[in-house]
Image (cartoon, rainbow, N blue to C red):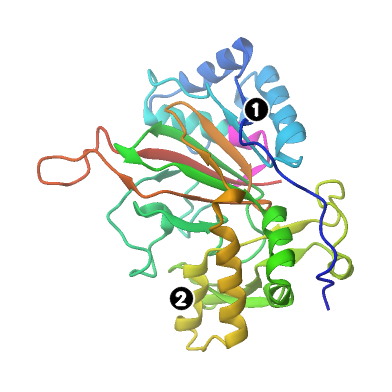
Amino acid sequence: MLDSDVKINLRLKTESNLPSVELSSDSLMELDSIYDKYDYFEPTLNPKLFNLESLSKDAFNFRQNYLEQKIGYIIIKNFWNPKYSIEQAKNGLLIFSQLFGKIIQQNASGLLVKEVKDRSKSYTHDSTSRYSESKYGGNYHTDGAEIPPPLPDFLTLVCIRKSKSGGEFKILNANEIHNALLEKHPESITRLHKNFIWDRRGDLGPNGEETFEKPIFSYSTAAHALTLGTDFYTDQNNTLTCEYLRQYIDDGYKKSETNQTQEDIDALNSMDSVLYDDSLAQTILLEPGEILISTNSHTLHGRTNFTDFTNEDGSPDPKKQRILLRTWIIK
């Protein structure tokens, strides 16, 4: 049994103090050397090919002072210069991401750097498409919810172009969510720490599995789940993690032809009621050239609906369309 009377002592207050920084001139020169290397995307690039002393120090400091602290994310305001192409931006992101850990593929085809943009898909009606391929908002989630553990430790998003309107990020801290559940819906905690069925979104398992099981909340050690009292940022051996995207859970039950119990539904509804309390969310509108890096297992994020610039026929204008670049990283 989980002790729902014990709360994790963490409160996140950043409404007037976004954790934003700028790279030094030396780091920018090192980034330029990456951008200048090729005018096309080269997925085999690695940091050993460059002198990245300043950039490596920055990455270490960002990880130590932001990503592995209570805030759990950082915005770098001058990561990419629009004088460079999207393909060059991918190279810069590929190398920079490797300074935080190992990049992992984002689908079965081995994609390392994804263009996040509206592909006129609806992930609520097409169970092989993903949230990142739509223009719709809501649905707070962690990236990699459709894959079995381990979850990507870090998520990066570089803004190449903004949308015509909308597309603001909403980001929340997992401990804040857990604390709110303990306060408002303590009866849901035990269920949320047990397995749910998740949809793989078309990337089948080794034996053709369409689904798999994992919990929404978990601790790195089973014994720690009995205490719930230690701030997970100060004890990296006992880390609270959160994985969520409700649509993927609902679709997982449908594909496995398993009915959700009333306990399942009530726990998920409790989770959603807390997630969509705007008092817990920080709103961020990324500008072109900025990069957001978040600790994926300690934060959840979503966005508002967005509207793209379009051609006369109503299709997205490829020269103005909202585009973000994304990587997934494990330590």
Decide whether residue 260 is among the magenta residues.
no
Spot occupied by residue 149 in the image (x, y as percentages of width and height): 66, 63
175 to 85, vertically: above or below: below
Residue furthest out toward the left = 312
Spot occupied by residue 37 in the image (x, y as percentages of width and height): 47, 21
Query: Which of the two marks, 2 or 1, is nearer to us in this view?
Result: 2
Give the label on residue 177, or none.
none
Q: How many marks?
A: 2
Decide which of 287, 256 is in the foreground and name it: 287
| Residue drawn at the location 39% of the way across and 70% of the way down | 127
| Residue drawn at the location 60% of the way across and 38% of the way down | 293
Check whether the beta carbons of the residues at disc 2 and disc 1 lie within 8 A of each other: no
150 to 168, vertically: above or below: below
Spot occupied by residue 93 in the image (x, y as percentages of width and height): 52, 33
Camera sees residue 41: no
Give the label on residue 48, or none.
1
Q: Which residue is mark 2?
A: 251
Q: Does residue 84 appear left or right of residue 199 in this picture?
A: left
Q: Earlier in the sequence, mark 2 or mark 1?
A: 1
How far apart are the two marked residues, 2 and 1, measured between alpha carbons?
42 Å
At mark 1, the secondary structure is helix
Decide which of 200, 181 is in the foreground and name it: 181
| Residue drawn at the location 48% of the way across and 71% of the way down | 204
| Residue drawn at the location 61% of the way across and 31% of the way down | 16
Q: Amino acid at mark 2?
A: Asp
Q: Residue 7 falls in which quadrant of the image?
A: bottom right
